[in-house]
């Protein structure tokens, strides 16, 4: 499991609170990680799988109880 970057918990909390800039920064932060996970699994559809995963993260972000566990 990847260690979250410093400050990710605060960024998650801000995004959960409705801060749209924090949401954008958070998605920018996790996109390379999600791409590395989805690419080898989905192969030719890696970009679509990455997009779907990021949409799900965005939709479910408020349900995340432990912000430091985002990369888990």
Image: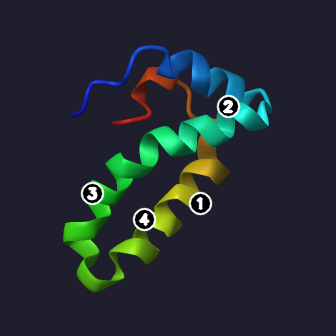
Checking the image for residue 41, the label placed there is none
Confirm or deny contact between disc 3 and disc 2 (CB under 8 A). no
Checking the image for residue 22, the label placed there is 2
Between 56 and 51, the residue placed more toward the observer is: 51
Image point (52%, 44%), residue name = 28
Residue 8 vertical placement versus 34 (above, below): above
Image point (52%, 57%), residue name = 54
From the top left corner, tell me how far across and down residue 22 is, in percent: 67, 31
Checking the image for residue 50, the label placed there is 4
Image point (44%, 22%), residue name = 68
Q: Residues within 10 Å of mark 1 (few under 14, many from 20)?
A: few
**Which residue lies under the disc numbered 3?**
37
Q: Please give left or right for residue 38 compared with residue 15 in the image.
A: left
Q: Earlier in the sequence, mark 2 or mark 1?
A: 2
Secondary structure of residue under mark 3: helix
Confirm or deny contact between disc 4 and disc 1 (CB under 8 A). no
**Which residue lies under the disc numbered 1?**
55
Measured in 3D between alpha carbons, the distance from the residue under mark 2 to the one under mark 4, in whole angstroms, is 20 Å
Measured in 3D between alpha carbons, the distance from the residue under mark 4 to the one under mark 3, in whole angstroms, is 8 Å
Q: Nearer the viewer, mark 3 or mark 2?
A: 2
Q: Earlier in the sequence, mark 3 or mark 2?
A: 2
Confirm or deny contact between disc 1 and disc 3 (CB under 8 A). no
Measured in 3D between alpha carbons, the distance from the residue under mark 3 to the one under mark 2, in whole angstroms, is 23 Å
From the top left corner, tell me how far across and down residue 13 is, in percent: 65, 22
Instruction: Tell me the quarter of the picture where residue 5 sits.
Output: top left
Secondary structure of residue under mark 1: helix
């Amino acid at each position: 499991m990847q260690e979250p970057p410093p400050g990710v918990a605060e960024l998650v909390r801000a995004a959960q609170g409705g801060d749209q800039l924090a949401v954008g920064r958070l998605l920018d932060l996790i996109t390379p990680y999600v791409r590395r996970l989805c690419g080898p699994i989905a192969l030719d559809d890696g970009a679509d799988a990455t997009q779907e995963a990021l949409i799900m993260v965005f939709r479910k972000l408020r349900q995340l109880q432990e912000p430091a566990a985002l990369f888990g």
